[in-house]
Structures are given as structure tokens and as C-alpha cells.
């Protein structure tokens, strides 16, 4: 990897057109396109065509079926049983797990990438489904006349309210939130907005690339995050520090000087020191 989206503005502009408006946010197309950071020649239309083929197979299987519970059963059998989608437990932190085309090829991914494919298939058969930005593990839900089903996108297993509360507890403990002060469980089961889903996918990649010290890829991901959330000043700090590690002093200085305007306390001192070093080296 020796390029960033800085040198491939066409891909960046295309992504920007997909995520510009909340009203017409093209989540699946945007999710497919983030793989262009790693594979700039990726055929996006071919990936969408593969999704379309899976949808056609599922729709044909359920021709004339009106019962949503039956649709859900057939969908899960098709998705997990026949197609074999599951979590990539052997290489969970591989960046490719976030790339839709790779997940389609290998049938392995992480919760959010597998969920997006499952949701796409579910909507093709008119199931009322949504993604859930649950802490630590992206989930999906189906609204049936019999009630709401919350499901693990990696296995198709459904969760009871008690099981969901147990999964949530470690995050409440980490935030030092007591049971008395905890918000209702339903607050954590609200439908995730497409922009928030895209941000979560990119945040996953941000953490992975940072841990792997892959600075060009980290910058590419942060470029997309800044486009999605331009008001988040800390993203300019993160990109500036990634540029520092990469050795791109000029761009690092621009980002850190911007963040210095809002930095406070000890962080402001650290940013100032980095800016001083960059200016001396320039």
C-alpha cells in the first residue's frame, strides 16, 4: 500500500456523493467502496451484481410467501446454512473483514460487515429489519407481528432481553454506570442511522490500522471519517498524528495547527510540542 485517497480523488468524490445527504445516504454502496483504500481497481459494480444475484435467489425461493416469520426462517437457513456466512474467528482483526467484496467471497467477516449483507437480503424480501449499534457487537432486529427479534448477525441466534442485558453489563461497568442509573435496554436497541453505521465500520478500521502502524491506510480511513463527521475536531488531531508517523510533515502541521485551536490542558501542550518539532524540521 503506497497511496492514499489524497492521490485518488475520484474514489473520494464518489464516496462523498454517497454519504452527502442523510436523506439519501447510500449505505451499501458506501460500504462497498471503502475497500478502494486497499484495492483501488476494485470493480464496485461487480460487487453489487453479486449481491443482486443472492437477492434474486432468495426472492425466487420465497415467491408468494407473505408470512414474515417464515421469511425470516428461510432467510437464515439460506444465509447461514446454505451460503455459510459466519464470523472470521481465526483472523478477526484482518482489515479485509470490513470489506464487503471480501466477505462475499470468503463468507467470513465481523458483525457489522456480515450484518450489512444480511440486511440487504432481508430487505429484498420486504422484511422489516434494522441494524443495531449495540456496544461491542453490531446486531440486527426484525419487527414481527409476534414481537421483536434481536439477532446475532454472525450466527442467526436470537437474544432474550436477559441475554442482551448480560451482554450490555460489561460496558455499563466500564462506564461506571449502576443498574439504578442505567438507561432502559430499549435505548441500546434503537435502529442505527446509516451514517452511524458507516462511521462504526471506519472506526473499526481506524483501530486496526493504528494497531498495525499502517499509517497510509490510517490516513485514508481518517479522510473518509472527516468527510462523514467534519465537526469532529479530534479526527484532524488523529490524522495529523498519523501524518507525523508517516513522515508527511506538511500535512501533519496543517491538521495539528487546526486542532491546536480547540485543544486544552495537557493535550494542548503535547500538540504544541509536536507542532514545534514539525516547524523545526520543515
Image: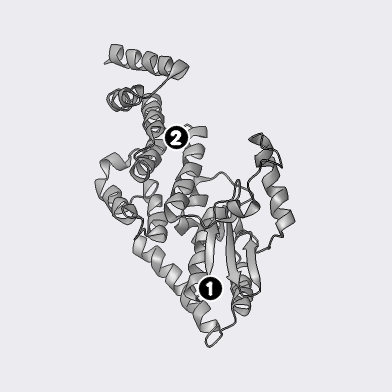
Does residue 118 appear in this view? Answer: no
Does residue 108 appear in this view? Answer: yes
Residue 266, x across and y down, in percent: 47, 16
Residue 141, image quadrant? bottom right
Scheme of image coloration? one colour
Q: Which residue is mark 2?
A: 214
Q: Residues within 10 Å of mark 2 (few under 14, many from 20)?
A: some
Mark positioned earlier in the residue sequence (2 or 1): 1
Residue 274, x across and y down, in percent: 38, 17
- The image quadrant where one finds the C terminus is top left
Residue 133's place in the image compared with 255, above or below, is below
Choose between 136 and 171: the one closer to the eye. 171
Kind of element beneath mark 1: loop
Q: Is residue 62 left or right of residue 278?
A: right
Residue drawn at the location 38% of the way across and 55% of the way down: 30
Cβ–Cβ under 8 Å for marks 2 and 1: no
Kind of element beneath mark 2: loop
Residue drawn at the location 44% of the way across and 47% of the way down: 199
Residue 217, x across and y down, in percent: 40, 39
Residue drawn at the location 51% of the way across and 43% of the way down: 204
In the orientation shown, which residue stands out farthest toward the bottom? 64
Q: Which residue is mark 1?
A: 127
Q: Is residue 5 left or right of residue 122?
A: left
Amino acid at each position: 500500500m503506497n497511496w492514499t485517497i489524497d492521490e485518488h480523488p475520484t474514489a473520494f468524490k464518489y464516496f462523498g456523493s454517497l454519504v452527502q445527504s442523510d436523506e439519501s445516504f447510500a449505505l451499501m454502496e458506501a460500504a462497498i467502496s471503502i475497500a478502494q483504500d486497499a484495492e483501488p481497481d476494485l470493480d464496485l459494480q461487480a460487487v453489487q451484481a453479486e449481491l443482486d444475484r443472492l437477492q434474486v435467489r432468495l426472492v425466487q425461493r420465497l415467491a408468494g410467501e407473505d408470512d414474515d416469520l417464515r421469511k425470516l426462517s428461510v432467510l437464515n437457513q439460506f444465509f447461514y446454512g446454505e451460503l455459510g456466512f459466519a464470523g472470521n474467528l481465526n483472523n478477526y482483526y484482518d482489515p479485509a473483514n470490513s470489506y464487503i467484496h471480501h466477505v462475499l467471497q470468503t463468507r467470513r467477516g465481523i458483525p457489522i460487515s456480515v450484518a450489512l449483507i444480511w440486511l440487504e437480503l432481508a430487505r429484498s424480501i420486504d422484511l422489516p429489519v434494522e441494524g443495531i449499534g449495540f456496544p461491542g457487537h453490531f446486531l440486527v432486529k426484525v419487527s414481527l407481528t409476534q414481537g421483536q427479534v434481536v439477532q446475532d448477525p454472525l450466527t442467526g441466534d436470537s437474544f432474550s432481553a436477559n441475554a442482551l442485558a448480560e451482554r450490555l453489563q460489561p460496558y455499563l461497568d466500564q462506564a461506571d454506570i449502576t443498574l439504578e442509573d442505567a438507561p432502559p435496554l430499549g435505548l441500546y436497541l434503537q435502529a442505527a442511522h446509516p451514517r452511524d453505521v458507516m462511521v462504526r465500520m471506519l472506526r473499526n478500521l481506524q483501530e486496526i490500522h493504528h494497531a498495525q502502524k499502517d499509517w497510509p491506510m490510517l490516513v485514508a480511513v481518517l479522510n473518509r471519517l472527516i468527510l462523514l463527521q467534519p465537526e469532529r475536531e479530534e479526527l484532524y488531531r488523529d490524522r495529523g498524528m498519523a501524518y507525523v508517523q508517516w513522515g508527511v510533515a506538511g500535512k501533519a502541521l496543517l491538521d495539528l495547527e487546526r486542532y491546536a485551536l480547540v485543544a486544552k490542558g495537557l493535550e494542548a501542550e503535547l500538540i504544541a510540542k509536536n507542532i514545534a518539532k514539525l516547524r523545526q524540521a520543515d
